[in-house]
Image (cartoon, grey):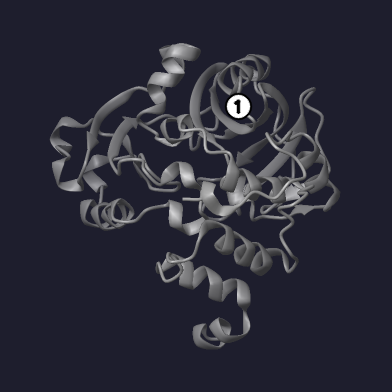
Amino acid sequence: MNKFVRFIVDRQYRFGVLSERGLLNFMSDKKFLIKMYKSKFNKKLNLNNPQTFNEKLQWLKLYDRNPLYTTLVDKYAVRQYVADTIGEEYLIPLIGGPWKSFDEIDFKALPNQFVLKCTHDSGGIIICKDKNKFDIKEAKLKLSRRLSRNYYYLCREWPYKNVPPQIIAEKYMVDESGTELKDYKFFCFRGVPKAMYIVSDTASELEETKIDFFDMDFNHLPVTHRYPNAKTPPQCPLSFEKMKKLAAELSNGLTHVRVDFYDINGKVYFGELTFFDYAGMVQFEPEEWDYIFGSWIELPIKGRDIDDKHRS
């Protein structure tokens, strides 16, 4: 199926293309999310009495407007929050930035290996394992495109709307695999971690990314979410109990947030804070887990429609 035909017949693909190109920016957040949810799940978004995790994330996008969230999703500004809350020893060392444009970066001042990261979005990352082989032109093209877009408009994750677009350089690090950093992502609800998943095979060009869910006793959960489970479930990280404690501290007082870490031979490093896992637009399999995760979110206001005066 060519792209034109797919655009005509595939509602989800069509919505994604229009959103990516900024052609739906005129929509209110509420109207946009209702239509996007319908395109993803082929069912109506229940905002009057949301029950599932994905529904409640859309509700939170519209009505939970804590201004602190903008700082917490800013990959540069959040470093101070982490340092103040759990200690700067959990931060991956910053080796450059922030820069407002790619051209400000002095590559001569950077080590042979480093990671460039946009502070205002998700996915704007360039990994350099050997500066002698680093394609600066390709990196500039990717990061400059990222700097020019407002990530908020893609899925109306409002905390990103006013984050200053910048680039930072962090120390290049790998875990015991020697090739990647596995992500340990904890789902926290008012300071209580309830579940987590491990992301693996992210550095392999031959393997699809894997996601495995676990409870807080590290029992493997029978659920998939966008990506398949690993053929062999990941081992419990050495710092599992430490990460649980730190996740609780970082999420204290927040309705819901996903707290991400890395483990390098038992040493914990902070990854990021995310309020809307996959924007709340990816189904759980089996579907009952969408309701289980949803039951853990206690909304600030329940069972009541709110008018649009709170939307951006």
* In the displayed structure image, the side of residue 142 where residue 201 appears, left or right: right
* In the displayed structure image, the side of residue 243 where residue 180 appears, left or right: left
Q: Position of residue 140 (x, y in %)?
A: 24, 53
Q: Position of residue 274 (x, y in %)?
A: 54, 37
Instruction: Kindly indicate the quadrant of the structure image that contains residue 283.
Output: bottom right
Q: Residues within 10 Å of mark 1 (few under 14, many from 20)?
A: some
Residue at the spot of label 1: 254
- Can you say whether 271 is above or below 57 in the image? above
* In the displayed structure image, the side of residue 99 where residue 241 appears, left or right: right
- Can you say whether 17 is above or below 28 in the image? below
Number of residue marks:
1
Q: Residue at x 71, y 53 (%)?
A: 47
Q: Position of residue 152 (x, y in %)?
A: 44, 51
- In which quadrant will I find the N terminus? bottom right
Is residue 189 visible to the viewer in this orientation of the structure?
A: yes
Instruction: Kindly indicate the quadrant of the structure image that contains residue 104.
Output: top left
Q: Residue at x 74, y 64 (%)?
A: 44
Q: Position of residue 248 (x, y in %)?
A: 64, 19
Q: Residue at x 34, y 56 (%)?
A: 149
- Can you say whether 118 is above or below 40 in the image? above
Q: Residue at x 46, y 17 (%)?
A: 90
What amino acid type is highlighted by mark number 1?
A: Leu
Question: Which one is in front, 270 or 172?
Answer: 270
Secondary structure at badge 1 equals loop
Question: Which one is in front, 210 or 309?
Answer: 309
* In the displayed structure image, the side of residue 233 where residue 63 appears, left or right: left
Is residue 201 visible to the viewer in this orientation of the structure?
A: no
Instruction: Kindly indicate the quadrant of the structure image that contains residue 94.
Output: top left
